Amino acid sequence: MERIAAAQPDVIVASEYDDKIYDQLAKIAPTIVIPTSENWQDTIGKVADIVGDEAKAQAYIDAYDAKLEGLAAKLDSDGLKGKTALFMMTWGKGFNYYYGKRLEPYYKGLGFSGFENQKDYGEISLEGVAEWNPDYIFLAEDFTNSAELNAEALKSNAVWNSLNAVKNGRVYVVDSEIVGPLAMGQNKGLDYMAEVFGKK
């Protein structure tokens, strides 16, 4: 609280997870709660409303949408639309995977396919990954550095090496930010996809 107060903010943007300290924050500066969301466009729009920069937020969203549309057309023309893809992060003894609203730009937007009974996010073992056997794997390494698995260790794993994505050289180790729900991460993810697939 002392560091927040020392920054002398004109306004504080908090989430519902800050309920316990809301009263303390409100004593420092007007505090506005924006519920967490998997939809970064909604979040960035609400923040823009607060700071009075709606036009800049809309320009950012429009530029992102145009980039997404252009890349989707490129993947479609290259015959990649409908290919299965798994976005996951090493975690514990296995992986966390991500789907749903957060990964909609990659699935609904770019045209990658998910898997039957895939939830918005969940834990999955290496054997579970093998059962799905995706065409493409985008692997983020655990940012807490506590996972028992990592990309280097997987190289010598027989199950891992039996996967189609591995055998075909379609595993990409990515920044964990691109599987996150924030605007900068989503934009970084699209830039990465353009770097990987835009050259083909």
Image: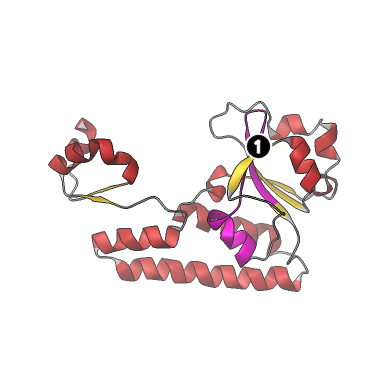
**Amino acid type indicated by mark 1:** Phe
Is the C terminus in the top left, top right, bottom left or bottom right quadrant?
A: bottom right
* Residue 1 left/right relative to 40: left
Task: Measuring from the top left, give residue 188's x and y in whole percent.
Answer: 53, 54
Q: Residue at x 50, y 66 (%)?
A: 64
Is the N terminus in the top left, top right, bottom left or bottom right quadrant?
A: top left
Q: How many marks?
A: 1
Task: Measuring from the top left, give residue 146's x and y in whole percent.
Answer: 58, 26
Q: Is residue 101 magenta?
A: yes
For disc 1, the neighbor class at 10 Å (few under 14, some 14 to 19, many from 20) is many
Between 64 and 198, the one nearer to me in the picture: 64
Between 106 and 113, the one nearer to me in the picture: 113
Residue 17, compared with residue 170, is above or below; it is above
Between 111 and 73, the one nearer to me in the picture: 111
Q: Is residue 91 magenta?
A: yes
| Residue designated by label 1 | 95
Q: What color scheme is it?
A: secondary structure
Give residue 89's quadrant in the image: top right
The stretch of residues the image draws in magenta is 86-108
Q: Residue at x 59, y 46 (%)?
A: 121
Q: Residue at x 78, y 54 (%)?
A: 135
Residue 193, compared with residue 158, is above or below; it is below
Task: Measuring from the top left, give residue 194's x and y in whole percent.
Answer: 63, 62
* Residue 190 left/right relative to 35: right
Element assignment for label 1: strand
Q: Residue at x 39, y 50 (%)?
A: 36
Q: Residue furthest front?
A: 117
